[in-house]
Image (cartoon, grey):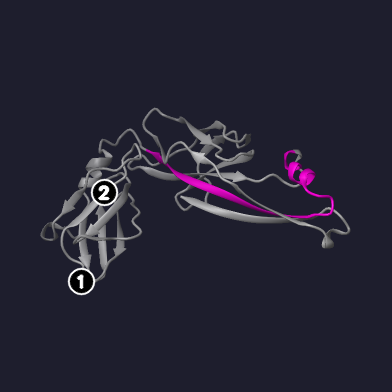
Amino acid sequence: MFSLIIGGTLLILSANAAAGEVVAHTRLFQIKLGSSRLIYSPGINDIALAVNNPQDYPVLIQGKAWQEDKKTPAPFIVTPPVSRLEGHQQSRLRVIKAGEFAQDRETLSWLCVAGIPPKNTDVWAQDERERAPSSAVIMNLEVSARQCIKLLVRPPTLSTTTLEAAGNLAWYKDGKTLVAQNSSPLYVHLASMSIGGLAVPEVTYIPPYSSRTFPVSKEAKGPIKWVVITDEGGRSRAYQSLPELAARPQG
């Protein structure tokens, strides 16, 4: 999951710059993470995550952990909180579990890591200004990209596996709505799904002991097929539920 934050700066280097050259620069401050999820199984409290800078120039990286709503801070420590990463180099973030979590079900949090542009006053932001003509106006468009991955905490009391939870999903259709019921203590992360051979767009995850609704056409009918994301970040085999076997959740 990515998000972009765009900021622009205008630097006038000469009183006569209005008549001079306009130098425009656009830079994307993006990072690449080594995994799409970190899973804290029993006994695991500290996981290292690889962070890569694919650009030719340095970038500041900043990681923060959030609860499922992506608004409330989650009880994890990300270290270092801010660091500089040179172009085409790799570093690591340590993500340390530092709080109490539910014991009867899996907990989902998010780790969001952003690539941050330098400030105009930073020493490593001087190069473009020094290379520009003295009569130039420099227009910098800097795009900060943030990538979020899942943090999943599993208590020691759980014995259900991700694939077992996926295979036990129950489905029913109500008009233009397809409902998936998850009766397991784990999150089920859908990679794709279809009904009657028609793909259902915008698939997402289904929380423990909860249901999720998906909009479909009223005429859609036939077998429901779904594929989930595995613990390793890959795709599972396809599961199928025939309409006559699709179970309506209780309550």
Q: Can you say whether 74 is above or below 15 in the image?
A: above
Residue 222, x across and y down, in percent = 15, 62
Instruction: Using the image, tell me which numbered label, if any, was put on residue 219.
Output: 1
Magenta-colored stretch includes residue 149: yes
User: Which stretch did the figure color magenta?
Assistant: 124-153
Please indicate, yes or no, whether residue 137 appears anywhere in the rendered image. Answer: yes
Write the residue at 12% across / 57% down: 245
**Mark 2 is on which residue type?**
Val
| 15 relative position to 115: left or right | right
Magenta-colored stretch includes residue 44: no
Residue on which the image places disc 2: 227
Q: Can you say whether 231 is above or below 242 in the image?
A: above
Residue 204, x across and y down, in percent = 35, 54
Instruction: Using the image, tell me which numbered label, if any, was put on residue 77.
Output: none
Write the residue at 80% across / 54% down: 136
Sequence order check: which comes first, mark 2 or mark 1?
A: 1
| 100 relative position to 115: left or right | left
Q: SS class of the residue under badge 1?
A: loop
